[in-house]
Image: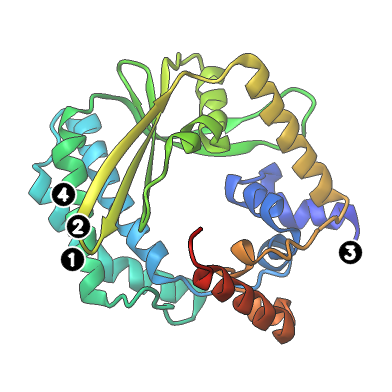
Amino acid sequence: MSPETITLIDLPRGRLSPSAADTWKRCGEQYRRRYILRQKGPMDSGRLLGTVVHAAIHEATMQQFGMGKRPLPEESAKMAIERVDLELARAQSETGLPLVWKNDMTIEKIKKISHAMTLVYEEQVGVGLHPALAEREIELRYEGVDWVFPLRIDILTKQGVLIDVKTGMKHQNQMTVVTSSQLTRYQMALESIGERVMALEIHSISWGEKKGATVKRFACAPRTKDQMADEWANLLQIAKGIRAEVFPKANNWQVCSWCEHLAGCQPREWVEAALAAEQDKETVPAA
């Protein structure tokens, strides 16, 4: 397969998506299977939960942005429950594969947790948001480059705070907001259309069996011009690697353990050895 063919397949209409770029950086083989060979993998219950909560918060933010009034927290939480069956059906229709259930999840548990996560976010954060932009699509482009980098910005407040909402079983941390490539790209895109970014924030919504749903906010100063230049150089390097047909395999259990292509990619002996190593880590007594 020639670099020209790669260009046509991977960069349709001259676009390199953030998910594609991050996949190549994480594991070239995962990228090759997903974006070149078009091998579809199933959605798992964790991704379904995150999709549902994001959709409910998105809907609340768009109502506030469009009509000037945000739904009551309980109304948004109910929207999350209603989205579960819809998103599950959509995922199965797109992949043709059943959902992969993780962490003892069930459909009813996802509805319960998505309701709780949406409710805590809306009560503690959503009611105080004043969005200037919400779910804005921006194409990041530079002169002399024959492709664009499309981005969808979660929230930019009227105070210039750029917000990225994250969900998961564990909270993000302060280092995440400081090092996030995603926030760097968002700031680059916003500044390219004349918007001023005064601060960066990650809103981390998590769930635990003991504490239930909790939300934490992590903030830092906006990226410098040098930091944004470094990120653009990183994106150029990724595009160069894709077009040169360079697809380095991660061979890293932290990456491979959740990859939908694990069974067809790594030898069984490698997987068994990686699992044994992880179990050894868990059984080593604390010093």
Is disc 3 placed on a helix, strand or loop? loop
In the image, residue 96 above or below residue 47: below
Q: Of marks 2 and 4, which one's residue comes earlier in the chain?
A: 4
Q: Is residue 143 left or right of residue 195?
A: right
Q: Position of residue 286 (x, y in %)?
A: 48, 61
Q: Of marks 1 and 3, which one's residue comes earlier in the chain?
A: 3
Q: Which residue is mark 4?
A: 119
Q: Position of residue 16 (x, y in %)?
A: 67, 45
Is disc 2 placed on a helix, strand or loop? strand
Q: Label 3 to label 4, Cα distance in Å?
A: 49 Å
Can residue 114 be seen here? The reply is yes
Residue type, mark 3 in image: Met
Q: Label 2 to label 4, Cα distance in Å?
A: 11 Å
Give the label, 3 or 2, closer to the camera. Answer: 2
Residue lying furthest right in this view?
Answer: 2
Q: Label 1 to label 4, Cα distance in Å?
A: 11 Å
Q: Which residue is mark 2?
A: 212
Q: Label 3 to label 2, Cα distance in Å?
A: 50 Å
Q: Give me the residue at 43% from left, 75% from top.
A: 93
Q: Position of residue 244 (x, y in %)?
A: 88, 51
Give the label, 1 or 3, closer to the camera. Answer: 1
Snapshot quadrant of residue 264: bottom right
Q: Give me the residue at 49% from left, 35% from top.
A: 175
Residue type, mark 1 in image: Lys
Q: Which residue is mark 1?
A: 112
Q: Which mark is residue 1?
A: 3
Density class for disc 2 (Cα within 10 Å; few <14, some 14-19, many ≥20) is: few
